[in-house]
Amino acid sequence: MWEMVNNRRVLFGENRIDEIPGILKWYGLKKVFFASFNSNPAIRQRICEGLEAEGIDYVIYNKIKGEPDLTVINEGRDVFVEEKCDCTLALGGGSIIDAAKTIGMMATNGGLVEQYQMEGRQVTQVPPFFLAVPTTAGTGAEATKVAVVKNNHNGLKKSLYHNTMIADVVILDPTVAVGMPKRLTAATGMDALSHAIESYVSLNATPISEMNGLQGIRLIKESLEVAYNQPEDLKARANMLLASYFGGCAISAGIGIAHIMAQPIGAMYDIPHGDACSIFLPLAMEYNLDHATEKYAKIAEALGVAEHGAPAKENALAAIEEVKRIRKSIEAPDSLKSYIGDKPVDLDFMVETVQKTTGHVACNPRKIDEQTFRNIFNLAL
Ligand SMILES: [Fe+2]
């Protein structure tokens, strides 16, 4: 038994962002809450000029600099309400999209984000119209109903979600992603690859999530290294936006031990999410190897490294080696060492934090216990 939640409309292709004002106008929307950070000033300006030409008012909210926390979201909700906005537009990476997703939900539901995140407050009202334009290719946040929020009180990163929080319209326009810095391309690409692989081997995988995951893996193989080495390559950027989108569609089926470790440890040591995924993904595959052998062999096919007629385990191992090769080729991190530095490692606290924040233990193909966290953490050092 399963279900899935999808966007209502997805526009793919170069310069599709120019259609934003017309879409908002069709829905009769009058004032946009425009969440975007200052890293895309030219694109933002272009969108604003389009809105002005259609007589649509907007307020720019540019306080979301990194992964969103309680303050930035609660303040954003106040701005949305005080400015009488009637829709949300997000231009940015996963942090901006997740923040906008949450701010819109709170604009109609009221309260503080921590109530939804920690205290079980329920979403009861439909959020305003929400249009998301991802500028990085990794989180797939535009394709999910989930938002990851950092809780300033306890330092934990925790998700909140509702079926109605998913973006109504998504625009995948490679012209907004060209020129993305190499480090960001690598980190977000490894995040997308982690979503595709972990959801594919999830015990809750569905026929649709598997299809999305495999297609994401194929596109990443074809285009991540190209996007990394040739940042202006529009085809590679388009493929990576699609791969990230497919990964986002797939993760509703669950993620595994790489993300279970990456999320809290990333928060503890201030590691960008994609870098943390890069460190943990091959370790996760090795841990799961004997419990998802056939599926890893299929992943090897998607990565173009499977040998026809070879035993599944041989191909599964080839998939792990290929992930490591791609990671090395794009200079993505393979160890926690440089992030931890001289900071003391409190393994007990780390294990406790991981256990407190994770909601996906049950869908990892191999059973996970406290010792698993310790072993994988030590292997990542
Ligand atoms: Fe992720």
Image (tube, rainbow, N blue to C red):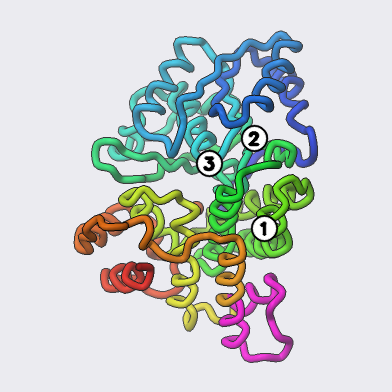
Q: Residue 194's spot in the image, x, y percent?
A: 54, 61
Residue 248, magenta (yes or no): no
Q: Secondary structure at mark 1?
A: helix
Q: Residue 105's spot in the image, x, y percent?
A: 47, 29
Where 188 sits versus 75, above or below? below
Residue bounds of the magenta highlight = 295-319
Q: Secondary structure at mark 2?
A: strand
| 47 or 197, nearer to the observer | 47
The earlier-in-sequence mark between 2 and 3 is 3
Where 246 sits versus 117, above or below? below
- Mark 2 residue type: Val
The earlier-in-sequence mark between 1 and 2 is 2
The Cα–Cα distance between marks 2 and 3, rounded to whole angstroms, is 10 Å
Which of the 4 image quarters holds residue 143?
A: top right
> Which residue in the structure is indicated by mark 2?
133
| 282 or 337, nearer to the observer | 337
Q: Is residue 380 left or right of residue 206?
A: left
Q: Is residue 82 visible?
A: yes
- Mark 3 residue type: Gly
Q: Main secondary structure of the magenta part?
A: helix
- Labels 2 and 3 touching (C-beta < 8 A): no
Q: Can you tell me whether the CB of the residue at mark 3 lies under 8 Å from the nearest atom of ligand 1? A: yes
| 318 or 345, nearer to the observer | 345
Q: Is residue 83 left or right of residue 11?
A: left
Q: Which numbered marker is on residue 224? A: 1
Q: Residue at x 23, y 60 (%)?
A: 345
> Which residue in the structure is indicated by mark 3?
94
Q: Callout 3 environment at 10 Å: few (<14), some (14 to 19), or many (20+)?
A: many
The mark closer to the camera, 1 or 2, is: 1
Q: Residue at x 26, y 69 (%)?
A: 370
